[in-house]
Amino acid sequence: MFNPPLHFHGFQFESFAVRKGVGHYFINTQSRVPDATKPIIVQAGESIGMPIGAYHRFETADPENELAVEVLLRPDTRETEHRLFRNFLGCVPVTKRVGIPAH
């Protein structure tokens, strides 16, 4: 299971629908400290949303069992997706070098 690092979305609302397993979701609108909040437990059949600009991450609550989630980003335009992945994957220095703004 890939556990995304602490991050935020400056232009998108992100929601997670847990399809299988149990997830621990951490949301912190005040700081970049990953464990500054207690985990919110989300089980199969439940959903949770992350406000624009809120630092967040998630992980499986039980490493012995699979966590399967459906992720929805809104708006889901091509440009907002490009911004997300350029920034998330740490490509900001590269995009600046070739003249692509990293929003």
Image (cartoon, rainbow, N blue to C red):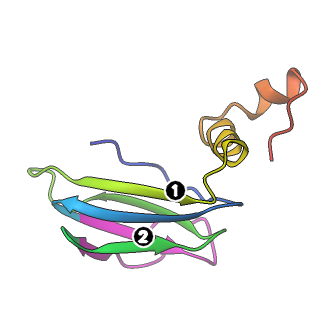
Residue 2, quarter of picture: top left
Was residue 102 drawn as part of the magenta stretch in this picture?
no
Can you say whether 52 is above or below 72 in the image? below
Q: Name which residue lies at 63% across and 59% down.
A: 75
Q: Name which residue lies at 44% across and 78% down.
A: 37
Q: Position of residue 61 (x, y in %)?
A: 21, 63
Label 2: which secondary element: strand
Among numbered discs 2 and 1, the one appearing first in the sequence? 1
Name the amino acid, label 2. Answer: Phe
Q: Is residue 65 left or right of residue 39?
A: left
Q: Is residue 78 left or right of residue 6?
A: right
Q: Name which residue lies at 63% across and 78% down.
A: 30
Q: Name which residue lies at 15% across and 51% down.
A: 63
The image quadrant where one finds the N terminus is top left
Mark carried by residue 63 = none
Name the amino acid, label 1. Answer: Leu
Can you say whether 37 is above or below 97 in the image? below
Q: CA distance from mark 2 to mark 1?
A: 9 Å
Q: Circle 1: is it few (<14), some (14-19), or many (20+) Cα within 10 Å?
A: some
Q: Is residue 95 left or right of residue 11?
A: right
Find the magenta span and give its range: 23-42
Was residue 41 drawn as part of the magenta stretch in this picture?
yes
Q: Observer-nearest residue: 33 or 43?
A: 43
Disc 2 and disc 1 in contact, CB within 8 angstroms? yes
Which residue carries the number 1 mark?
Answer: 6
Q: Position of residue 9 (x, y in %)?
A: 63, 59
Mark carried by residue 26 = 2
Q: Position of residue 40 (x, y in %)?
A: 33, 77
Label 1: which secondary element: loop
